[in-house]
Amino acid sequence: MTAAPLVPGPVTVRVPAKVNLELLVGPCRSDGYHSLATVYQAVGLYDDITVAAADDFGVSVGGPLADGVPTDDDNIALRAARLLADRHEGSPVHVSIRKGIPVAGGMAGGSADAAGTLVALDHLWGLDLVREEIEEIGSELGSDVPFLVAGGTAMGSGRGERLAPVLARGTYHWVLALADGGLPTPEVYAECDRLRGAHDVPEPVATPTLMAALRTGDPHELATQLTNDLQEAAVSLRPDLGETLAAGMEYGALGGIVSGSGPTCAFLVETTEAGIDLAVALTASGVAADVRRASGPVHGAHVIHHRVD
């Protein structure tokens, strides 16, 4: 165990959201998780995480999407701070979260906060951990945490925490239709299992055609390959998502998909201008509670400010 020297702060880290370009769900494992084969893309919708020395561990949350984020020991960023402190004899810190990623929206907002906290504390305490070490610690907190440390485009296996890089050319433009309320991930997986019934479910394997589409850099090619095995379950629980997906396609999206376990719907468009048009149409139609635009892939958790006294 390495003792953590306290470096003057605070440190602020910016961390992105994710969209699952492909999410293939296999059978339930003995540990209660499902086997996954997924392709993540980090997109430019961000939370900012600031850590600073404090008398005791604590967390506060602000920003446009702060509602519903716990500020007690259930907060995953606070758990990340305690975990890293236990490993490296770190002193207490206060974690401040500014939310720009939907809560329980299928875009890994909680995992992003944990990833940002780990990266910020590595910098604050001068631990100089390599990225793979941070990802390994993050995997103990949540399946998506390692990817939000890494960012870019990557394939996830296991329960999503084992990463492999994916070659992706170009920039992809997304319109994200946010929904009122969240969808708890365990409920969506349970509904997926219910809909599948007693059918045998094979181990999932990433699709070569999706990888090929990413290598072209052509959004039209990628749009035909977007897949989410949890989408049927999410729509079963929230039928309004079906209406949102249909509206997005009607208004000009190249492709649309429920992001992760939902309820955010992610629409792929050709250009920034097409994204503006689609966002305006979705807003005017009233099918989405809120609409955001983002592009990807973008970098994972990264320091944007560190005050050294």
Image (cartoon, rainbow, N blue to C red):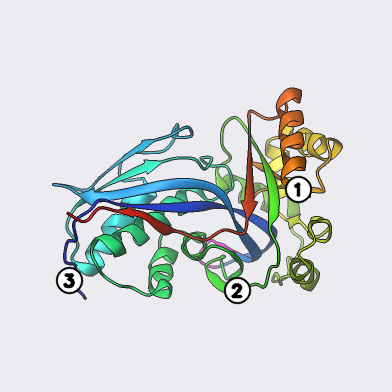
Q: Which residue: 59% across, 75% down?
A: 164
- Residue 113 horizontal/vertical position (percent): 42, 50
Where residue 201 sits: x, y (%)? Answer: 73, 65
Q: Position of residue 97 (x, y in %)?
A: 37, 43
- Which span is picked out in magenta? 30-34
For the residue marked with disc 1, what is the amino acid?
Thr
Could you tell me which secondary element the residue under label 3 belongs to? loop
Asked whether disc 3 touches disc 1, contact meaning CB atoms under 8 Å apart, the reply is no
Say which residue label 1 marks: 271
Tell me the quadrant of the picture where the C terminus can be found: bottom left
User: Residue 120, image x and y in percent?
Assistant: 33, 58
Whether 141 is drawn above or below 258: the answer is below
The answer to whether residue 123 of the structure is visible from this angle is yes
Residue 260 in the image: above or below residue 149: above
Q: Is residue 230 visible?
A: no
> Which label's residue is closer to the chain start, 3 or 2?
3
Q: Which residue is mark 2?
A: 165
Amino acid type of the residue that numbered disc 2 sits on in the rendered structure: Pro
Q: Which residue is mark 3?
A: 3
Along the line of sight, the residue nearer the viewer: 106 or 221: 221
Q: Quadrant of residue 219?
A: bottom right
The image quadrant of residue 183 is top right
